Image: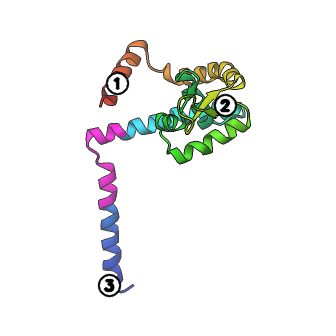
Amino acid sequence: MDRMQEDSMGNEKTEIDDLQQLVLDLPAPNEAFFALVETTANLVAVSEKYWQSQGLNGARIRVLVEIARQGGAILPSVLAGRIGVTKANISLLLTPLERDGFISRAEHVQDGRKTIISLTEAGRTLLTQQLPGNRIAIAEKMNRLDAEELRQLMSLLSKLNRQ
């Protein structure tokens, strides 16, 4: 190997070391953020594992839960905003739910240009039967915290969520 190649590899190694140092040396707020992201991903994985064990899709269940939270009916654009997807992607989630009979689409009573999404009886039954098992799976992880720690966590999350 000639001197130029050695210098090039040395520079590359220094750049990698600098990059590694940049991603490892995080200020406390960033470190907390990434810990929160990792924890959330782990808890979502617990939930998703439960849904998969029931032959269900967690993202679709999330849609049904949000419709239920809104009283059983919602506009697609509002639903998209509530679950954090684009208006275009909401159709990809709604189509199989409608096909499987868990939701229905109807013309909005006051504005015929809009569509309202509603839970069907089958959708309500699915949630009634399946949500308790999911809640147990999540509680098993969350029960690592005692009541006071859960209260503190909820308080901190609330503080972070304020606009």
Name the residue rendered at 35%, 19% in the picture.
152
Of 21 and 89, nearer the camera is 89
Residue 115 image label = none
Residue 4 image label = 3
Which residue range is magenta in the image? 18-33
Callout 2 environment at 10 Å: few (<14), some (14 to 19), or many (20+)? many
Contact? badges 3 and 1 (CB < 8 Å): no
- Element carrying mark 2: strand
Q: Earlier in the sequence, mark 2 or mark 3?
A: 3
- Element carrying mark 1: helix
Residue 29 lies in magenta, yes or no? yes
Judged by its main secondary structure, the magenta piece is helix
* Residue 143 horizontal/vertical position (percent): 50, 19
- Element carrying mark 3: helix
Picture quadrant of residue 93: top right
Q: How many marks?
A: 3
Name the residue rendered at 69%, 30% in the picture.
102
Of 106 and 27, nearer the camera is 106
Screen quadrant of the N terminus:
bottom left
* Residue 33 horizontal/vertical position (percent): 35, 39
Q: Earlier in the sequence, mark 3 or mark 1?
A: 3
Picture quadrant of residue 18: bottom left
* Residue for badge 2: 103
Residue 158 image label = 1
Residue 26 lies in magenta, yes or no? yes
Q: Which residue occupies the extreme left position in the image?
A: 27
The kind of residue tagged 2 is: Ile
Instruction: Answer with left or right where residue 95 lies relative to residue 110.
Output: right
Instruction: Answer with left or right where residue 74 lies relative to residue 127.
Output: left
